[in-house]
Structures are given as structure tokens and as C-alpha cells.
Amino acid sequence: MAADEPLVLGIETSCDETGVGIVRGTTLLADAVASSVDTHARFGGVVPEIASRAHLEAMVPTIERALKQAGVSARDLDGIAVTSGPGLAGALLVGVSAAKAYAYALDKPLYGVNHLASHICVDQLEHGPLPEPTMALLVSGGHSSLLLAPDITADVRPLGATIDDAAGEAFDKIARVLDLGFPGGPVIDRLAREGDPKAIAFPRGLTGPRDAPYDFSFSGLKTSVARWIEAKRAAGEEVPVRDVAASFQEAVVDVLTRKAVRACKDEGVDHLMIGGGVAANSRLRALAEERCERAGIRLRVPRPGLCTDNGAMVAALGAEMVARNRRPSDLELSADSSLPVTEPHVPGAQHGHGHSHDHDHVHEISKDNLYS
């Protein structure tokens, strides 16, 4: 870690985790998270208004905790990065507003970055600089995507994505059908270790010869599992929860890893990075390792704590923006709930006219009216 490497604070509030991370170059100094997941568990899913209010309450204490953990002062920072999209509009707005306030008060450059690109960049904190291009499989509650990134700060290309339910969403829905609570991923992973993944032949979506090779679909699988469970219950039979969990999980990770390895081969990329919350799943990691080794592909997966939403990933991408002299965002930066992955960051206007594109911006603010 060199003292001249950029010191950047990152803020992540796209869903229900208030994450604040601090990195110097590719070295992680602090990773503070305040989660509202327990509050949402009562409702069986994330409630946007509750998430936004929780971010508001947690923001300043979490930033102070991260600064203390890193042993740095806010004035030492070389930049402030924040997730500007995609995500829940209200939740994003809290993080973007906080980042703009800190950037303005400290007179530091501001970088609005993409949530998905951040999930890829976080791997630098564990395994060193990303290869170029990087092939990434991102799997979470809201996204299942195959991405090719020749330059994580400026060039991210979508190869395939989910056409309905994301992988993490399917885990949550099946957990609900099995009365396992929320979030569903960790409990299904745990129960599946004691079950038989071959007990029930659940379908593998979009794996036919005429199907889109890199797209994902988990809605049919979810319906198939739910109907199987309902039929057992209707017949008065006990549902073998562990076998259902194992067979369902196997169907998901089989498709994810099969398509990811195929994309690597087709694009001539000799490594695969897996990120997002579902990347913490033990079976996904094991099967990916097995298939990548067989195909001569090097696998890069961050530790589970860096796979779920966190501020470290945002800081990592922000530090890369600073290191590569990318243009900062300006104080008209908006929270953009549908920011496309093809925009790794939202640069400010070169001549001070502000950033503008056709997504659903929810907030506009300028230096002139910040305190008016």
C-alpha cells in the first residue's frame, strides 16, 4: 500500500444495507455496515420506505465508524464515491444526498458509480487488480447478469441477464413457500447441505439449443418447486425440506455456472469473477470451482462479506476512477434507479451544464441551492 494511492470513501445504500467503506488504492482500510434486514424480515421482503428511513438514521454514525476504523480523517480523503444506481430510488437518494453534502463540505471530488460495476471491482481488494477484460457473473436478489468488462471504469458490456426473477429473488420466494423466513439464501444453503441435490428433477430454464445462451430465467423453476410442494401438502405428505432445498439450489447453480463457463470459452477469457449476494452461496462456489478447473479457467470470488452489498465495493470503484483520472460527477448528480450497467459511473458535464440522460432521476441539486 503506497501513501500516494488514492484514499476514497464509498457509500452504498441501493437496498437495505447502509455500507461505508474506505480504501487506499486496492487496500481495504474499513468496511462498516448497518443492516435493516431484521426490520424487513417481519414483512417477508424489503420495504422501500423503511429502508430509506433506516439509511437516514444510520448514515452519519456509519461514516464516523468507518473513518475511525480506517484511522483517517475525512479531510485526508482524495474523493467520495457513492452508488447512484441501480436500486431503490428512495434508498439511493439518501446515499447520494449524503455523499454530495460531504463532498461539498470537504471540497472533495464526487464519483457517482454503478452498483453492478462496484460488485465486480470489489474483487480487487482481495485478489489484486482485475484482468482486462474481466468476465463477471453477478448474482443477487435483484440481478443475474453476465458481464464483460474490458475497463471497469468506462467499458462494461452486458452479455446476458435475467428475463424474469433474479437468482436471489427465487431463493427468497422458495424460502417463503417453505416457511423458512427472509432472507432465503442463507437458510436454503444451510439446509441443502443435509439434502440430496438429485432427489427431485427440477427444470433448468433457458438451457435449450434455441434459447439465448447467456440469459437467465428462474420464474419457471420457482413455479415448479412451489407446485411440487403444494402437491405434497395436498396429499397430506410431509415435505422433505432439505431435499427440496438441495434440488432447487442445484438447479439454480447448475444454470449459472454452466452459462458463465460457456461465456468465458466463447469470449476467449481465461478467468471468471463471481460477485453479488448469491456468490456467498457455498454450492455455487464449489460447483463454479469444479467447472472452472475442468475448463482451465481461473476463478475469482471475493469472501462472502464482500459479496453482499457493502461500501467497500463502492470505494474500490471510486479509487479506480481517481487512479485513472476519470472525470468526477458534479453536484447535480442524481439518484438513478435504472442506471444501466453500461454506465460504470456518471461523469459531470465538462462545461458545467450538469449530467442528463433519459432515466428516472429522482433528485436534482446544485451548489447554488444546496443550503437554500
Image (cartoon, rainbow, N blue to C red):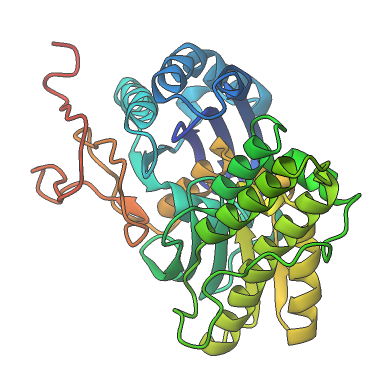
Left or right: 113 in relation to 26: left
In the image, 307 versus 124, the foreground residue is: 307
Position in image of residue 30 (x %, y %): 65, 32
Q: Which residue is farthest front? A: 235
- In this view, 118 is above or below 107: below
Q: How many marks?
A: 0
Q: Residue at x 31, y 27 (%)?
A: 100
Quarter the C terminus occupies: top left
Q: Nearer the viewer, residue 248 or 272?
A: 248
Vertically, is 115 above or below 214? above
Q: Is residue 300 visible?
A: yes
Q: Residue furthest right?
A: 194
The residue under the point 71% across, 56% down is: 248
From this view, report whether residue 10 is shown above or below residue 293. Answer: above
Q: Is residue 27 visible?
A: no
- Res. 96 image quadrant: top left
Q: Residue at x 17, y 25 (%)?
A: 367
Q: Position of residue 16 (x, y in %)?
A: 51, 28
Query: Residue 182: x percent and y percent?
Result: 64, 31
Q: Give x and y (percent) for residue 176.
A: 63, 35
